[in-house]
């Protein structure tokens, strides 16, 4: 970061002409080209908040170097390359460098982007009357002349990046301002840093912009721009939610694909198009790493750098529909076993690399459950005063045990009260029977915090013999989530069970309750779709976010309408979801028992304290 004294000193070394405008003022005279609906109109930074913030930041000279990352076709070349380069050449009258990965790309960029902008904006008078640039070709060294006198104002050096981190011939052409375009095709971050040294001789007066998407290129361990990110401020646009008033940064996890809408990461409310534009128009920059000394970085990602209003209608064409279609297409390809399209989508549209968590990107309800959490009437560990039944569901494995406590009110609305996990001492080693039993006892001790629970049930599908003996000794009901129950149907116990449950007596004399997990998960999903506070609604404790353990487990499965079943997402754990299924089933069974009138439970002085009340 450049302090004020250093910036003033640098300005005195290379003082621009007295009438020179700053970058922001200069940008307002740029005429857009390219054949779109805005072709021939002047760039109006105030009409697009992302462009407005970016140009203000670069114009302030707060940092020497800026790293501009944005999705494809979102204005990077215009705002990161053309405007700053022309400003350096024409307004500041200093030498500038324009660097691309290859000479072929230089030619394409010159003829396709830069030259049309120069012509449309009336800057052609500054180009030489003779030579390659005068004929529209690619200039290796472009001289910028004063229109009236023909005297040289500045030079533009156009070069390709060196190979393998080596310097190129442009080292002999030091520049005050340097632009590195298409930096995603650099060999590595070291190559970009060597290129930056071409401005070093000018001290604080030197600087530039590196622009890039984050594409996928096989055979490369790490993207060169991603290597640079830890050294940057990692600045993002913090939108102002019109519903909760929080400044938030939307991410992929906040994109509701089915509704083609963003949701506020703070309150979870889905933004309408007008909401989204209001949030963006009031956005401000937030630095994730404010102590960065070299780079100021605009990491645009989902902020979408280019959503200008159509001059004919005044309307802004939303990118949400296009984004949703790309998402679905890329995800479908990944499901077919081809991850390349998904990786490209992640990098180019969301500016993030693929990772293990990307297989868990939500396509349904993750964010909506986080939104419900912000509107929930209770906190974790608190049993609501309206509670009529409290049940606990548990699930066990070779080394682990999980539990979830559920409270149900007379209107059949329910609240998740608490959840937990216990494991054997060494999670990598094969557990001994003693260690497994100790884990089960630790789980029971954890569940014992709710001493007034009406019923507790455990899945006996794994390590059945030990779990059955342990459960019977503690009065815990034996349960299975299975549509194909075993054993002889227990007519007495089945008299009052709902259609999705069935009691069966096993050969050892124990009775297991089999429940239709698919049907119950559908009922749970319906409850979680109801407005919090309404009858039959499901509630998560306050403060749960989309990445938290509870929500990740509860949203680990998706409903496949073709088969009418719930299927586990790749690499997801659903243990707490299974615990919720058993707890919900036990609660409904308790509520449906005849000749029982369930009123809210009353606190008792002789029981252990749990949350804010004693039960």
Image (cartoon, rainbow, N blue to C red):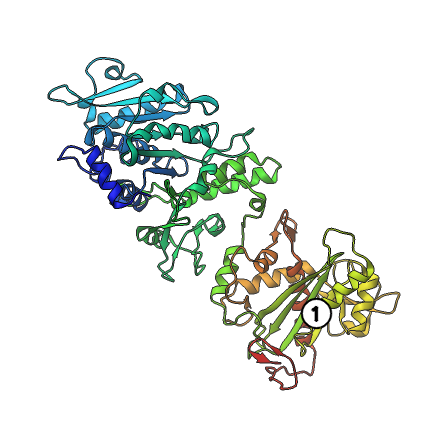
Dividing the picture into quarters, in which one does residue 301 lie? top left
Image vertical order of residue 380 relative to residue 70, above or below = below
Drawn side of residue 274 relative to residue 588, left or right: left
The answer to which of 113 and 388 lies nearer the viewer is: 113
Q: Position of residue 198 (x, y in %)?
A: 34, 27
Drawn side of residue 10 relative to residue 406, left or right: left
Q: Position of residue 304 (x, y in %)?
A: 38, 43
The answer to which of 441 and 73 lies nearer the viewer is: 441
The answer to which of 321 and 9 lies nearer the viewer is: 9
Determine whether the residue tagged by mark 1 lies in a helix, strand or loop. loop
Dividing the picture into quarters, in which one does residue 134 lie? top left
Give the residue displayed 62% in from the left and 70% down from the top. 406
Residue 332 makes an appearance in the image: yes
Q: Where is residue 432 in the image (x, y as percent from the top left)?
A: 81, 57
Drawn side of residue 349 relative to residue 597, left or right: left
Count of labels shown? Answer: 1
Image vertical order of residue 49 relative to residue 590, above or below = above
Query: In the image as oriented, which residue stretches furthest toward the right?
Result: 507
Residue 486 makes an appearance in the image: no
**Residue, disc 1:** 498
The answer to which of 437 and 344 lies nearer the viewer is: 437
Give the residue displayed 48% in from the left and 61% down from the top. 371
Give the residue displayed 15% in from the left and 32% down from the top. 17
Q: Where is residue 125 in the image (x, y as percent from the top left)?
A: 17, 22
Give the residue displayed 60% in from the left and 74% down from the top. 408
Label 1, residues with CA under 10 Å away: few <14, some 14-19, many ≥20: some
Drawn side of residue 580 relative to residue 203, left or right: right
Query: In the image as oriented, which residue stretches furthest toward the top?
Result: 131
Image vertical order of residue 318 relative to residue 124, above or below = below
């Amino acid at each position: 970061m450049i302090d004020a004294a250093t910036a003033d000193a640098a300005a005195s070394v290379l003082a621009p002409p007295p009438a020179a405008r700053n970058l922001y003022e200069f940008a307002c005279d740029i005429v857009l080209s390219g054949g779109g609906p805005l072709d021939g109109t002047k760039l109006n930074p105030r009409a697009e908040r992302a462009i407005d913030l970016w140009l203000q930041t670069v114009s302030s000279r707060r940092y020497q170097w800026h790293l501009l990352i944005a999705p494809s076709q979102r204005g990077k070349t215009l705002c990161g390359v053309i405007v700053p380069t022309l400003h350096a050449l024409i307004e500041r009258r200093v030498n500038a460098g324009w660097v691309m990965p290859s000479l072929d790309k230089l030619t394409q960029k010159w003829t396709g982007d830069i030259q049309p902008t120069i012509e449309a904006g009336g800057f052609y008078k500054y180009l030489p009357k003779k030579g390659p640039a005068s004929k529209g070709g690619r200039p290796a060294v472009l001289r910028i002349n004063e229109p009236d006198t023909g005297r040289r104002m500045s030079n533009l050096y156009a070069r390709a990046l060196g190979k393998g981190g080596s310097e190129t011939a442009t080292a002999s052409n030091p520049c005050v301002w340097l632009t590195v375009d298409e930096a995603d095709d650099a060999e590595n971050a070291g190559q970009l840093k060597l290129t930056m040294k071409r401005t070093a001789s000018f001290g604080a007066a030197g600087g530039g912009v590196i622009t890039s998407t984050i594409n996928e290129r096989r055979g490369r361990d790490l993207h060169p721009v991603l290597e640079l990110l830890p050294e940057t401020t990692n600045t993002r646009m913090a939108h102002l939610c019109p519903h909760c008033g929080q400044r938030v940064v939307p991410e992929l996890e906040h994109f509701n694909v089915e509704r083609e809408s963003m949701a506020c990461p703070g309150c979870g409310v889905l933004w309408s198009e007008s909401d989204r534009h209001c949030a963006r128009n009031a956005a401000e920059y937030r630095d994730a790493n404010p102590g960065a000394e070299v780079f100021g970085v605009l990491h645009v990602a989902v902020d979408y750098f280019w959503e200008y209003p159509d001059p004919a209608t005044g309307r802004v064409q939303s990118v949400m529909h296009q984004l949703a279609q790309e998402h679905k297409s890329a995800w479908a390809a990944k499901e077919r076993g081809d991850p390349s399209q998904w990786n490209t989508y992640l990098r180019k549209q969301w500016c993030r690399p693929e990772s293990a968590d990307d297989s868990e990107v939500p396509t349904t309800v993750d964010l909506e459950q986080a939104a419900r959490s912000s509107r929930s009437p209770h906190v974790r560990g608190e049993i609501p005063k309206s509670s009529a039944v409290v049940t606990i569901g548990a699930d066990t494995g070779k080394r682990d045990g999980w539990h979830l406590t559920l409270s149900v009110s007379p209107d059949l609305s329910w609240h998740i009260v608490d959840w937990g996990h216990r494991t054997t001492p060494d999670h990598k080693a094969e557990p001994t029977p003693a260690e497994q039993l100790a884990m089960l006892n630790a789980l029971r001790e954890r569940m014992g915090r709710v001493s007034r629970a009406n019923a507790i049930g455990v899945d006996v599908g794994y390590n059945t013999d030990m779990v059955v003996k342990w459960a019977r000794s503690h009065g815990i009901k034996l349960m299975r989530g299975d549509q194909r129950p075993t054993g002889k149907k227990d007519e007495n116990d089945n008299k009052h069970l709902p259609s999705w449950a069935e009691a069966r007596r096993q050969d050892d004399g124990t009775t297991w309750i089999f429940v239709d997990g698919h049907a119950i998960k559908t009922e749970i999903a319906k409850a979680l779709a109801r407005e919090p506070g309404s009858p039959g609604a499901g509630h998560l404790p306050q403060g749960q976010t989309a990445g938290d353990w509870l929500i990740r487990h509860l949203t680990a499965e998706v409903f496949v309408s073709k088969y009418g079943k719930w299927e586990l997402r790749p690499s997801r754990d659903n243990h707490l979801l299974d615990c919720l299924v058993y707890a919900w089933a036990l609660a409904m069974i308790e509520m449906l028992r005849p000749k029982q009138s369930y009123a809210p439970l009353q606190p008792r002085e002789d029981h252990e304290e749990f949350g804010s009340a004693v039960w």
